[in-house]
Amino acid sequence: MTSTSASGSAPATAQQQRVDPAPGRSAGGTSGAKRGRPKRSPLARREGRAGWLFISPWVIGFLIFTAGPMIASLVLSFTDYQMIQAPHSVGVDNYRELFDDPRVMKSLSNTFVYAAMFVPLGTIFALVLAMMLQRVGKAGGFFRTAFYLPEMTPAVAAAAMFLLLLNGQQGLLNKVLGWFGINGPNWTADPNWLKPSLAIVSLWTVGGTVIIYLAALNGVPKQLYEAAELDGAGPVTRFFRITVPMISGALFFTVITHTIAAMQMFDQAYTMFYGPQQKATASDESLVYMVYLFQNAFQFFKMGFASAMAWLLFVIIMLITFIQVRVGNRYVYYHGER
C-alpha cells in the first residue's frame, strides 16, 4: 500500500520539477545574462546619423538662442546686474520685489484683461472669416492670400497705422461710426478704452488662424451635415452640434497659442503708447507686462529684476497652459480617437 502510493506520486513530483525556467534564468535556476539591445544594422546607424545631421541646425540654434539665454536669465534673476558693472548675487530679493512693486501687479492685471478680451474676440472673428471664406468658391485663393498678408506686416507698422485709424478726433473708425449716429470714444487717450483698442489692433494678425480654421472646416465630413438636415436640424444646431465639435482640435490649439501670444504682447502697446511721441502721455492703463519688463531691462538698467519678471511670466504661462490642457482635453474631439 505504501509502495503503491510512493510510486504513484513519483511521476507527479518529477512533473513538478520539469517546469520552464523563469525568464532571464537558466534551467538550473541560476541567473542568466540580461538581454542586451539588438545591434543596429549599418543602414540604421547611417540613417540615425543623417537624421541628427539634418536637425543639427535647429539643435544648435535652440541651445545658443533659447536654452542658453534662458539659463543665463535664470542666473541673472538672482543678481543685481545694471549692465555697466559685474553682477553680484542678491539671493531672492528680486523675486520679493516683484510682489512689492505695484506696477508689476498693475501691468500683469492689464495683460490678463487684454488677454481675456483678445482670445475670445480673435477666435470668434477668425472663425467667422473662415466660414465666409469657405463659401467664396473660386475666389478663395485670392482671399486666403489677402487674409494672410497682414501676418507679414511688421507689427510696428501696423500699430502706427492703427494709431491714425483710432484717433479720437480725426480717425477713420470714429468717422464711420459717426455715419450711423454713434459718437466714438477717444480710443488711444481714454483710460477705459486703451485695452479694448489694443485688442482691436491685435485682430489684424488673425490671418494665420483663419487659414487653420478653414482647413479644419474643410475636413468636416459632408455626410454629417446631410444626415443632420434629414433629421430637421437647423443651421444653428448644425453649427454647435457638428461644426464646433469637429473643429474643436483646431479651436483648442489656437486658444492656447493666442493666450501665450497675448501674455507676451509687446510691439503694439509699445509703439502706440510708449513711443518717443507718446511716452509723456502714457497711462498705466496701457502698461502691459512685457512693456514694463522692457523698461526695467533697457531703460532702468535693472537686468536682474527684469530677468525675475521674465521667469514669473514663464511660470504663469505654464500654469495657464496646463489648466487649459487639462480642461480642454475633456471637450476636444480628435478624429483618430475611438
Image: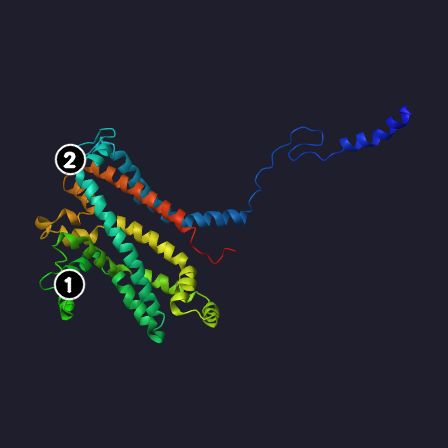
The crowding category of the residue bearing disc 1, from other C-alpha atoms within 10 Å (few below 14, some 14 to 19, many at least 20), is some
The mark that comes first in sequence, 1 or 2, is: 2
Q: Would you say residue 207 is visible in this rendering?
A: no
Instruction: Please state which amino acid type lies under the numbered disc 1.
Output: Leu
Which circle marks residue 84 in the picture? 2
Residue at 62% x, 32% y is 33
Q: Nearer the viewer, residue 298 or 185?
A: 185
Nearest the camera: 338 or 177? 177
Residue drawn at x 34%, y 72% is: 140
Q: Secondary structure at mark 1?
A: helix
| Front residue (pair 137, 200) | 200
Residue 144, image quadrant: bottom left
Q: Nearer the viewer, residue 281 or 157?
A: 281
Instruction: Give the residue furthest to the bottom.
Output: 138
Q: How far across and how far down the image is residue 280, in percent? A: 8, 49
Image height check: is 108 above or below 208?
Answer: above
Expressed as whole percent of the image width and height from the top left, the position of residue 161 reads 16, 61
- Lateral position of residue 148 relative to residue 32, left or right: left
Name the quadrant of the N terminus.
Answer: top right
The image position of residue 329, as x and y in percent, is 42, 50
Q: Residue at x 34, y 54 (%)?
A: 255
Instruction: Report the side of 2 relative to 250 (left or right).
Output: right
Q: Which residue is mark 1?
A: 165
Q: Residue furthest right?
A: 1
Q: Is residue 128 above or below residue 301?
A: below
